[in-house]
Every structure is written in structure tokens, then in C-alpha cells.
Amino acid sequence: MTPSPSDETGPSGAGPSGKKAPPSETRYVFVTGGVVSSLGKGIAAASLGVLLRERGLRVTLQKLDPYINVDPGTLSPLQHGEVFVTEDGAETDLDLGHYERFIDHNLSQDNNTTTGRIYRNVIDRERRGDYLGRTVQVIPHITDEIKRSIRVLAKGHDVVISEVGGTVGDIEGLPFLEAIRQFRQEVGARAFHIHLTLVPYIQAVGELKTKPTQHSVRELMQTGIQPAALVCRTEHPLGEEIRRKIAGFTNVDPAGVIEAIDVETIYEVPLQFRRQRLDDFVLARLGLEAPAPNLAVWKRMVRGIKGPSSGSVRIAVVGKYTELVDAYKSVEQALFHGGIRHDLDVGIDWIASEELEGERDPGFLAEYDGLLVPGGFGSRGIEGMIRAIGWARANGLPFLGICLGLQCAVIEFARNVAGLKGAHSFEFDRASPHPVICLMDEQRKVTTKGGTMRLGSYRARLLPGTAARRCYGADEITERHRHRYEVNNDYRELLAAAGLVFSATTTDGKLVEMIELADHPWFVASQSHPELKSRPTRAHPLFASFVEAAAIRRGGIEIPAAAASS
Ligand code: GLN
């Protein structure tokens, strides 16, 4: 274990000895959750991140996931939500998407680890003989590896916020809790524990109940962790009395009991925390001084979201994991960002593509102002996506295709415009006479599934005079990828002759990155995942332009010239 230079550890550090840590030393905030899952730990962690960043501190966020998969790349989006891909091609938990969107900073593989990854590192080391003669155990070897994965982030950061996935009391989370307990023991007052709980409202008696919070904190204390602050999710204001009661039962300073009442938009949470001075409380405890946060931009954005002045658009997202919005978290957020950019409210209907394979005629899409077909894997629902895209192409409905969405658009065009009967993707029909989407030669040899796709950031060159070039306002761009299949180069000439525009390729020209149609109001698709780079304060240009096209289709909506994308 090699601690980074800025982060010498051990009981001689600050804390138990009572010594104040020098301001240069990295501080650690640990976020745990109790009572039930899905309380929004990721948003809470990211919101604290925003406040600290806006106070001029260098902040990073990390997710520690207790499951045994090495990464979520092989998990079904219906189980675990979207797989968020970072610039360096790491397949990570969707909370990293929230982190990036909130602190407006790119993260990497180091910002997400899992039990599987921790064990793999320890077992690799054991095989190399690094522990020769010793029994390898959860304590200290696994917990040491967890602490190492946290400490790796210290370099260049004033504060590292680590969120532990799952709920206290889960068996699989225990090594992580033990590791963060030890961490506090080692770095003392440079570590701060926040626990997120639920304060339910019981309708029948009209009361808020603190018992689940008491139990959850007790459960956490049994692992040796005394939380310094509690973030209480609630549907009703806590009130001074409940706050004092919770503080009394949990040994938490009343100023550290934060009310997290349901809000209209997740982007309001940092403002909610600021009103209760959570950031002041955390910094005081960590012995850090920083100027008050500058939240002017953030406040303006939230005001815009809550009262859009240019009306609304309705977007149909036709995909295969529509039962779970989390499966398309970044797509949803990027559409909202497009709305923020143009002061529009974006209403999204999630439509299962399978529904479009039977009786249902895609004509109902006429009710919408735009169609988005997002990414996905496997053949279920593909024909429904192709039908929806065909309708959008023929009826001038603005269309944005993402990854699988691009592939389906190419298939649709090949079949119905270029006359290639039976055109398909090699992924779905190995016997297709026209595999317009196929595997690259070098990929054919790969037999394992985990981490074997085209992953992470790739550079693309945009064709002058195209909508893509106009949207981005640049000749070269980078976007993140996560896919195995590519447009088949053998068909490029034929499809181009039929009118398909290949508006972006990799810089060597070998792989198609974007397509579009010239004789259509707005029909653009990308092999990459632009949604992953969209931020609330900086909407991704493709999403901004798509939402704008939808508003124009809806008509009657004035887009102020200054807000219109270039
Ligand atoms: N299944 C397709 C591929 O692997 C598309 C992937 C995606 O949409 N992310 O190429």
C-alpha cells in the first residue's frame, strides 16, 4: 500500500491526537444509506460536491459498490440502470453520471470500484506471491485494498466524497463499512461520515416517524461508525422538534440533521442543502476554510427548470428498457438539459419498442415533436425501433438516434430507401444477405463479454456542410463509445448514393461515427453516446439542437435568437 504524498496516514495524523490537519491534506467524506434503498444517496453526495466545488475546493466523488461483478458492464440495464461510461472507457455505476453532471468534471475508473474488483486485485496479488506465507483475509487484506482504492483519489483533491452502495445491514456491504471505519480511525478529523435515512409520514396518524432513522443509525453504530450528519429524506418538513429528537437519539449535533424534503428537480438539492448550511457544517468539522459558495449560475438554472418561459415539447423515446427510466438516466437528463438551454419544458414518454411490432401503428408518433431511439443490446424490440424511425423519416419528425438508434436508422434506410431487402445487423441476424451493421475483423476473435467493446472516448471528424458540423461548431470532436458493432464499410458507397449522409467518421475515416439525412428537418444519429457528456449548465449540442428542432416542429414557440444553438 503506497499512500499518495499528500496523504500520509496512521494514528499520528490529525484527529484522535487532537492536532489540526494542515489545509493541504485531503479530507474524506463517506456517505452511507439506511432504512431503504433508492433514497438518492448519489444525488445527496453529488449535491454536497457541488457546494464544496463552488467554494473553490477541488472535489471528486467515488462510488463503492458492494456487488461481485467486476463492473456493471455485464449487468442488465433493467437490473441496475444505465451503465455510465467515462472518458477512459470504464463501465461504471449510473451515480457517476450524476457526479459528473453535478460537479461538471470528468471522472475515471478510479471513481468506481466493486467488491469484484477489490477481490480480483487481492487475488491477483496472492497469485503473484505478494502475501507469501500469510493467510489472506477480509480484514486486513480486503479492507486495506478498499482503503487503497479511496486513497488513490487523494492526489490533486482537497475533498474525496465516497458513497457506499446498498443499505447498512446488507451482509455484502460490511467490508466497506469496516474499511471506512478504519479510515476515520487513521485520518481522524479529516474524515466525515454522513448517513442518509428516511423519515416516513404515516397518513393514518398524520405524523412523521423517526424510529426507522434511529434503527438505521444504531445499525451503523454497530459497525463502529458514528455519523456526524444525517440527511433525512421526507415528504413533510421535519420541524424543530423532530430534528432535536433525531439528534438526541443519534448523538448527532442538531445542526447536522438535514431535512431533504422532496423537490421538483434533482438540481435543486444543492440549494436545499445550502439553505441548511450543510457545507459549513462539514467544512467546520473537517477543519477546512473556504469562501462562501457562488451559486448564481446554479440558481438561475433551477429557476429556469421550474418556470420555463418558452413552453414545452413532447419527445417519444422508443427503446427496449423503458420500464425502468434509470436504464436511460443520461438520455433523460440530456433531454432536460436541451430544454434548459432553450427555456423549454421537455416532456418524455417512454415507449416500449415491442409495442410497435404488432397492431400498434407508428402513426401515433404524430402527437410528438421528436423521436429518440437510444442504445441497447439484443434483438428484442428491434423491429419496433426500425418502424418508428421509418415513420419519423417519412413524416419529417425530428429524430435523434443513439448508438443502437444509429444502427436501426441505417438498417431502416438500407431496407426501405436503398432497396436492400433483408438488411440487418450481424448482431441480430447472422444470415442476413445485407449485414449493413457488422463486426470489425479484429473483434471477431474476441470471445469474452466483460470490457471487450469499443469503450470510452474516440476522436471523430465532421463533414463540412452537415447538420452535425453545424451543431458542434467544430471540425473534430470526441465522444464516448460503448458498442461492439459498426456500420459495414462495404455498404457505405451504396447507401451514400441513395442519400444517406455519413456526417462523421473516425479521424482515419475507417469507422462511421454519425449519419444524417439532408432532405429532412432534423434526422441525426450518432454511434457514440453524446448523452454522457451533457451537463445541466452546458447542454450537449446535439441534444440542444434536437430539442430546438422539436420546438420548431411544435410551432408557435419563439426561440430567442441568443438561445438558439449555432
Ligand atoms: N448492440 C449494439 C452494439 O453492440 C449497440 C450498443 C449500444 O447501443 N450501446 O454495437
Image: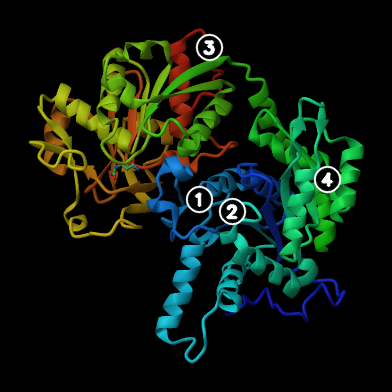
As drawn, the label of residue 277 is 4
Q: Earlier in the sequence, mark 4 or mark 3?
A: 4
Q: What residue type is labelled 3?
A: Ile
Look at label 2 and name its amino acid: Gly
Using the numbered discs, state the Cα–Cα distance from disc 1 to disc 4 in whole angstroms.
29 Å
For disc 2, the neighbor class at 10 Å (few under 14, some 14 to 19, many from 20) is: many
* Residue under label 3: 557
Q: Distance between the residues labelled 1 and 2?
A: 10 Å
Residue position marked by numbered label 2 in the rendering:
165
**Quadrant placement of the N terminus:** bottom right
Residues at circles 1 and 2 in contact by the CB criterion of under 8 Å: yes
- Seen at 32% across and 11% down, the residue is 363
Question: Is ligand 1 within 8 Å of the beta carbon of the residue shown at mark 3?
Answer: no
Q: Mark 1 points at which residue?
A: 93
Taking 526 as reference, is 445 left or right?
left
Q: In this view, does 414 lie above or below 69?
A: above
Q: What element carries label 3?
A: loop
- Whole-percent x, y for residue 149 in the image: 56, 68
For marks 1 and 2, the one nearer the N-term is 1
Asked if residue 438 is positioned above or below residue 86 in the image, the reply reads above
Is there CB contact under 8 Å for labels 3 and 2? no
